[in-house]
Image (tube, grey):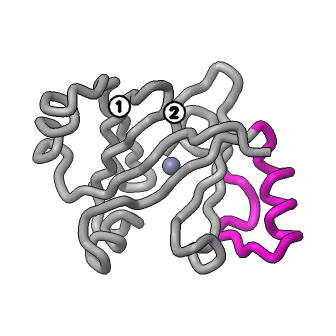
Amino acid sequence: MIRKIDHVGIAVKDIETHLVFYRDVLGLKFEGYEDLPDRGLRVAVFDVGGVRLELIQATSPDSTISTFIERRGEGLHHLAFGVDDAEGTLAHLIENGIRALDPAPRPGAGGAKVAFLHPHDTGRVLLEICEERPGGRRHE
Ligand code: ZN
């Protein structure tokens, strides 16, 4: 059901502040920025051995990242599992009593289907399931 860790998202106030560490000091492969204006987010994407690391910055005070940073400060935001079948995986989880923040997978950037699970049911980790569009790559 779960194929791999697809990506890890880190909430930051300002991407530029952290680029030197992740790109230059750690030497991670920087793949560029992705802007998601409809969700009020800007993302810097790194490739770490086939797993994406995303620095996620709010561009709108209404975004989920703004709320997260207000409440908890910067830090690890979510972990995303790559799946082949987002609908089937979500149905399986819901059948097993796991609460989903998204009642059905919704479109992410790049044509992916994504859904988030309630942290109270996952050991206080915000988990995302992510089905990438064939040939697609990015989402949120
Ligand atoms: Zn994600």
The response on whether ligand 1 sits within 8 Å of label 1 is: no
Q: Earlier in the sequence, mark 1 or mark 2?
A: 1
Q: Which residue is mark 2?
A: 138
Q: CA distance from mark 1 to mark 2?
A: 11 Å
Write the residue at 28% across / 53% down. 57
Write the residue at 49% across / 33% down. 51
Is 130 on the left-hand or right-hand side of 79?
right
Q: Looking at the figure, which quarter contains the N terminus?
A: top right
**SS under mark 1:** strand
Query: Looking at the rendering, which quadrant does residue 52 occupy?
Result: top left
Any magenta on residue 85?
yes
Residue 130's x, y, as percent? 64, 45
Please state the extent of the stretch shown in magenta in the rendering. 84-106
In the picture shown, does residue 117 fall above or below 15? below
Q: Nearer the viewer, mark 1 or mark 2?
A: 1
The response on whether ligand 1 sits within 8 Å of label 2 is: no
Residue 55's x, y, as percent? 31, 46
Is 121 on the left-hand or right-hand side of 42?
right
Residue 65's x, y, as percent? 35, 63
In the picture shown, does residue 22 fall above or below 137? below
In the image, what residue type sits under mark 1?
Answer: Phe
Write the residue at 73% across / 44% down. 2
Query: Looking at the rendering, which quadrant does residue 39 occupy?
Result: bottom left
In the picture shown, does residue 22 fall above or below 124? above
Dots 1, 2 in contact, CB < 8 A? no
Is 35 on the left-hand or right-hand side of 15?
right
In the picture shown, does residue 9 fall above or below 84? below
Q: Which residue is mark 1?
A: 46
